[in-house]
Image (cartoon, rainbow, N blue to C red):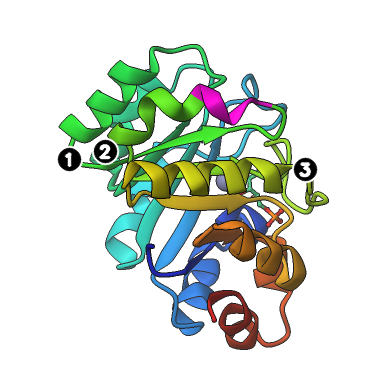
Amino acid sequence: MPTPVVAPSLLAANHGEFIAGIRAIEAAGLTWVHLDIMDGHFVPNISFGPQVVADLRPRTKLHFDVHLMLTHPDRFVTAFAKAGAERLTVHIEAAHDMGSTLAAIKAAGLKAGIAMNPDSDPRRLLPYLASVDLVLCMTVFPGFGGQAFIPEVLDSIRFLAAERQARGHDFRLEVDGGINAETGRQCRAAGADTLVAGTAFFKATDRQAFVAGLTA
Ligand code: DX5
Ligand code: ZN
C-alpha cells in the first residue's frame, strides 16, 4: 500500500500568483503539486499549458503530478516531459490509444497514470492496471475546482483497491475533486492513498492540520 500523499491542486490557487501557491504547498511540508491541464474541449474549461509548467519547474522541487484533461493527450506527452512533469495522468474517456499513450509516457521517463470520470465503468481500466503507476478516480466531473464530491465513486475506488490487492499491483490510487477532511477520510477508508485537494487545501485555516487529518 503506497504511503498516503496529499497533492494540492494549483487550479485552486491565484493564477496570477502561482509561485505563492507553490510556496504555500511547500510551507505545509508537502512534496506533490497537482497540475490540472485543461483544453476547453475534453472539459468545458481552459487552465494552463506546458509553458507554465516549464517556468515553474526550476523554482520548486515539488513533484509535478500533471493531470491531462485533454481530448488528445498523446499529442502533448513530449511537451510536458520537456516542461519537467514527473508524472502524466491521462483519461480513459479521451480520444487516443491508451496503451500507446502510456508507453510513450514511460518512454519519456515519466510515471504513467490512468484516470476515469465518475460515470465511467472502472472495469475499463483493468487492461491497463499492470502498466500504470497511478489510477485516478475522479470524484467530480472534471473541469472546475470547488465542486461537490460524488459519493457513488467510492464503489469504483473500492473495486480498484480490491483489484490492486488481488493482482499484486502497487499503483497509487488517487482521488480528485471535492476532497476535504470528511470526503478524504471516506476515500482513504475505501482504499485511496493519494488525495488531490484544491479548494479545501488553499482555504484551510490550518493547512498542516488539514493534511495530517488526511494522511493519518
Ligand atoms: C477538476 C480538477 C481537480 C480540481 C480539484 O477538473 O481535476 O484537480 O482542481 O479541486 P477541488 O479540490 O477544489 O475540488
Ligand atoms: Zn485534477
Name the amino acid, label 1.
Gly
Q: Which residue is mark 2?
A: 81
Name the amino acid, label 3.
Glu
Classify mark 2: residues with Cα within 10 Å, few (<14), some (14-19) or many (20+): some
Q: Secondary structure at mark 1?
A: loop
Which of the numbered marks, if any, corresponds to residue 69?
none
The residue at the point 76 percent across, 70 percent down is: 182
The residue at the point 54 percent across, 57 percent down is: 192
Q: Which residue is mark 3?
A: 152
Classify mark 1: residues with Cα within 10 Å, few (<14), some (14-19) or many (20+): few
- Image coordinates of residue 153 in percent, x first then y, are 70, 43
For the question of whether residue 91 can be seen, the reply is no
How far is mark 3 from mark 1, CA to CA? 34 Å
- Image coordinates of residue 155 in percent, x first then y, are 68, 43
Closer to the N terminus: mark 3 or mark 2? Answer: 2
Q: What are the residue bounds of the magenta stretch?
A: 120-124
Closer to the N terminus: mark 1 or mark 2? Answer: 2
Of discs 3 and 2, which sits in the foreground?
3
How far is mark 1 from mark 2, CA to CA? 8 Å
Up-down relation of residue 124 to residue 79 (above or below): above
Q: Is mark 2 within 8 Å of ligand 2?
A: no
The residue at the point 24 percent across, 38 percent down is: 82
How far is mark 3 from mark 2, CA to CA? 34 Å
Which of the 4 image quarters holds residue 112?
A: top left
Disc 1 to disc 2: CB gap under 8 Å: yes
Q: Which residue is mark 1?
A: 109
Q: Nearer the viewer, residue 85 or 131?
A: 131
Up-down relation of residue 86 to residue 33 (above or below): above
The residue at the point 34 percent across, 60 percent down is: 63
Of discs 3 and 1, which sits in the foreground?
3
Up-down relation of residue 8 to residue 214 (above or below): above
Q: Nearer the viewer, residue 179 or 36?
A: 179
